[in-house]
Image (cartoon, rainbow, N blue to C red):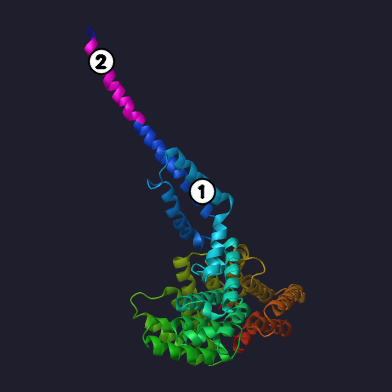
Amino acid sequence: MRTVLPGDATVLTFLAMVVLALVQDLVRQEVHIRLKRLPFVIMWLAARQAPPDLRDEIYQHWRSELEHLLSDDVRSGPITQLFVANRWALSLLLRQAGRRTAQELDAYGPPCMERFEDIRQLSRGERRRFVELTERLKEMSGLPMETLDDSGLVRLARAIAVSCEALVGNRAEQLSLALAAPLVEGGHPLAARLGLDHPAMLDLRRAHAHSRLGLGHGAAEELLLRLHRDETEVFGADDPRTLRTLQLYWWAVAADGRLEEAEAGLATMENRWALVPNPDLPLLRHVQCKRSWVLGELGRKHDALKGYGEVALGRSSELGMSHSDTLDARHSVGKMLVRCGDAKQALGMLRPVLTERRRLQGRHHPDTTETRKYVLIARALADTGPGGLARWRVRRQLSRILAQQIGTRGVDHPDTRDTRRWLADLARDGSSSSGRRSRRAVRRPRWPASSA
């Protein structure tokens, strides 16, 4: 058995002490690194108090200050540095500095409206944030324009345009019009400084015309035609930025009853997309949806159903089954089935859409109301029982929907007029077959509904 000599024991002891010192140093460095991360975690939690669109900006703004507190420029020991850094980060968290900083950023200049293009997709908290930012934009539009430089004016015009388009998409056309109209009509200082042909003002003018179109105003067609001419002069005839206005213009032409002209214009737009390398698919789906509605009004119901079905399939694969645009297309398929006389199949299509819209947008959202209305109409048309009791109940519920639409959207809103016409059809044709009622309804011109 080998014996350990005193010299060997000394070497082993020395090696053990070296290893122990190295381990202690590594542990000390590991602990120090993790302790230095702690204030960053606390600061990140404080930044989370701000709206999602401002969190990164606020965090990066604070980070430079925190890195300075933990740098070698601060002549203090590591324990003191960590204490000061953690105390500073905790003060941000406890004082709700994230929310306050967001308010200060909003007060400094026009708020950023990115991510708010379709507020139907947002959570309740983000929707409340959208309302706050829109109110801020409304306040800023009433301030003297001298308080902003040219870049600030451009940001303000673009932010208001995004907000107005989002309101139209959320079926709040009156609010959008109230925000946009003063800025593009009557020589507002914003338009005077930027000029009506500035790209930001072109976006704002489109939002204004879109609001009027959604409300059924006949003046929208002339506004859109003039806007498209101005966009063509600024961007060029082949620039894709002119297509958003053009598809709205053909929609206005269809609303005026010039269906063949509108169908030809929308078909030409679809053909143009075949030549574009990277087409704007959401805009293409809007054009296809509008053309399908026009085809239905022209009596080509099966072509309209096929077009709506393709839009619904494309949107579901691109956006998901529960996206608001997909639900719009599925709603349109069910509505066209109603007008084609296939009420039972329409019920199978519309009921899941109604469930999703109630879950995502609420029971009282205009989209939910429209889908519920067509579920009731399909139910009335599918009722072949004696006595017509179910049909009478449907008419009573439609009357309540009509009263609600008159109160919230106005007596002349396209959706309100559509409900009034269906009530008249059902009351007059209570004893007729569902196919005859549907055929007569299709022959009578109807303004494009909001979910078409």
Please name whichever residue, 451 or 21, is drawn nearer the observer in this view of the structure. 21
Question: Viewed as shown, does residue 396 lie left or right of 247?
Answer: right
Number of labels in the image equals: 2
Residue at the image point whose x is 57% and y is 68% from the top: 130
- Name the dominant secondary structure of the magenta segment: helix
- Identified by mark 1, the residue type is Ala
Identify the magenta region. 6-24
Work out how far the residue at label 1 is from the one at label 2, CA to CA, in angstroms: 49 Å
- Asked which secondary structure carries label 2, the reply is helix
Does residue 340 appear anywhere in the picture?
A: no
Residue 438 in the image: x percent, y percent?
62, 82
Where is residue 134, by image quadrant? Answer: bottom right
Q: Which mark is residue 10?
A: 2
Where is residue 347, by image quadrant? Answer: bottom right
Please name whichever residue, 445 or 416, is drawn nearer the observer in this view of the structure. 416
Q: Which mark is residue 378?
A: none
Residue 69 in the image: x percent, y percent?
44, 48
- Asked which secondary structure carries label 1, the reply is helix
Does residue 399 appear anywhere in the picture?
A: yes
Question: Viewed as shown, does residue 286 lie left or right of 144?
Answer: left
